[in-house]
Image (cartoon, grey):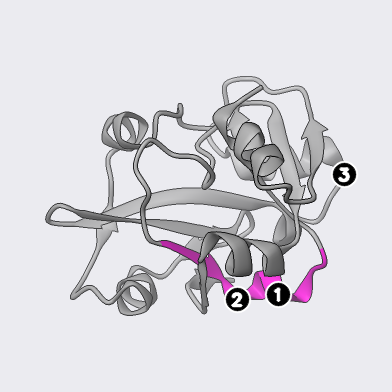
């Protein structure tokens, strides 16, 4: 199993695995939603942004974009920009298309778009392409100290 799934098991956080067929793709989040037959608003993508040497994780619906201005505000940074894919892979230990917000190589501030709170379960990457994991957003905020903020552009 992946480090992300191992962390959920270790912390006894309720979760459900959602494996799906995955090919090389430009939009992994939307592809996952389509493959799983779920609304794009419920399947979230993990993005890595940074300012200078401070990185931050953004988790937004696969159907939308991330407001970098709102992400910077939520993270307490002056501004942020998207990290290059190769840098994000090196920092997190995951490959693009499978970057999970869980059990990354380095613990980073993590901001979840507040639209997630409308769902009992959201899907995030399970740590590899073709594997999503369903979790309760409330559990992530409480147990993993994520921050909920309006960072998505829907």
Residue lying at 80% horizontally and 56% vertically, measured from the top left: 39
Q: Which mark is residue 37?
A: 3
Occupied quadrant, residue 75: bottom left
Closer mark to the observer between disc 2 and disc 3: 2
Residue lying at 45% horizontally and 26% vertically, measured from the top left: 95
Residue that label 1 marks:
117
Picture layout, residue 22 above or below residue 137: above
Q: Quadrant of the N terminus?
A: top right
At mark 3, the secondary structure is: loop
Q: Residue extending furthest right?
A: 37
- Ranked by sequence position, the earlier of labels 2 and 3 is 3
Residue lying at 82% horizontally and 66% vertically, measured from the top left: 120
Residue that label 2 marks:
114
Q: Answer yes or no: do the residues labelled 1 and 2 have beta carbons within 8 Å?
A: yes
Q: Is residue 119 magenta?
A: yes
Q: Which residues are magenta?
A: 110-120
How far across and down, in percent of the image, does residue 25 sit?
57, 28
Picture layout, residue 13 above or below residue 80: above
How far across and down, in percent of the image, does residue 66 sit?
45, 64
- Ranked by sequence position, the earlier of labels 1 and 3 is 3
Q: Answer yes or no: do the residues labelled 1 and 3 have beta carbons within 8 Å?
A: no
């Amino acid at each position: 199993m992946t480090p992300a799934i191992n962390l959920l098991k270790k912390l006894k956080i309720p979760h459900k695995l959602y494996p799906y067929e995955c090919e090389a793709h430009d939009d992994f989040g939307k592809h996952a939603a389509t493959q799983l037959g779920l609304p794009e608003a419920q399947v979230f993508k993990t993005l890595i942004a940074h300012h200078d040497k401070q990185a931050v994780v953004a988790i937004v619906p696969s159907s939308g974009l991330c407001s970098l201005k709102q992400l910077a505000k939520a993270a307490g940074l002056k501004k942020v920009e998207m990290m290059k894919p190769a840098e994000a892979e090196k920092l997190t230990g995951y490959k693009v298309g499978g970057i999970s917000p869980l059990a990354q190589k380095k613990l980073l501030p993590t901001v979840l778009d507040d639209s997630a709170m409308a769902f009992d379960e959201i899907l995030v990457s399970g740590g590899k392409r073709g594997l999503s994991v369903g979790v309760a957003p409330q559990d992530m905020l409480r147990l993993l100290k994520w921050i909920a903020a309006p960072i998505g552009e829907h």
